[in-house]
Image (spheres, grey):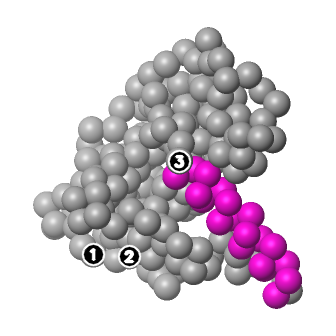
Amino acid sequence: MLTQRQTLELTTRRLPVRAAPGLPQDFEAWFHEYRGSVYRYVRFRVATREVAEDVTSEVFMKALRSIHRYDPDIASPKTWLLRIARNAVTDHLRALRRRGSLHVSLDRVPDLVADAPSQEERMVRQERIQKLLNGTRTLRKADQEILSLRYGGGLDNGEIVEQLGISHNAVAVRLHRALRRLKRAVDGPDNDTTSDYDG
């Protein structure tokens, strides 16, 4: 597994020379400040840690190549990077769909359970994660996207407004409904006490 510094170095080494004669002043700071948010957003959407690392590296490569198009009056660096990440994840998932390999099994997500101190705690956590993964996979793409932005990318509602181009109220409503549908998917319809009406 590459360290974050190695990923940045690899990212900048793999770029064409014409893309950036030197690292832009803000880019390294952006990498250090936002790599966690980008990685978590990507990891929330893809099957393995290795794939998430590869896609995250690709996000920063794409960002570096197109940094001349970044406009601080339109988006914050975090929002801009997560927009690139959304496109990279979409491209990755589209490629997987073409190959027919979207299935995720629990043994492929060890990074989500590695911090639990005991075997018993790891097993309990694995079961919970498996339920969440299975539940998330049953949600509509729009629900997966908004939950990924909020809980994977760590965006607040205002930043999600920038990403999706919808109102604050629409973000709050969509998040609420997506969480309710995820709870229903995880707990099963028999344990759902909320109305099926979405308005």
In the drawing, does residue 181 fall left or right of residue 18?
Answer: right
**Callout 1: few (<14), some (14-19), or many (20+) C-alpha neighbours within 10 Å?**
few
Density class for disc 2 (Cα within 10 Å; few <14, some 14-19, many ≥20) is few
Q: Work out which quarter of the rendered image holds the C terminus and state it.
A: top right
Counting from the top left corner in percent of width and height, residue 81 is at 43, 47
Q: Position of residue 107 (x, y in %)?
A: 57, 80
> Is residue 129 shown left or right of residue 11?
right
In 3D space, how far apart are the residues under numbered discs 2 and 3 (Cα atoms)?
38 Å
Magenta segment boundaries in residue numbering: 119-137
**Amino acid type, callout 3:** Thr
Q: Residues within 10 Å of mark 3 (few under 14, many from 20)?
A: some
Q: Is residue 135 magenta?
A: yes
Report the magenta stretch's main SS.
helix
- For residue 60, what is the image quadrant? bottom left
Judged by depth in the image, the label closer to the viewer, 1 or 3, is: 3
Indicate yes or no whether the magenta region holds residue 57. no
Residue 65 or 50: which is nearer the viewer? 50
Q: Is residue 194 visible?
A: yes
* Sequence-wise first label, 2 or 3: 2
Residue behind mark 1: 13
Question: Residue at coordinates 53% horizontally, 25% vertically from top-left?
Answer: 161
Residue contact at pointers 2 and 3, CB within 8 angstroms = no
Q: Please, what is the three-letter code of the amino acid marked with disc 1?
A: Arg
**Residues marked 1 and 2 touching at CB (< 8 Å):** yes
For numbered disc 3, what is the local secondary structure?
A: helix
**Mark 1 vs mark 2, CA separation in Å:** 6 Å
The residue under label 2 is: 9
Please name the residue that numbered disc 3 is placed on: 138
Q: Secondary structure at mark 2?
A: helix
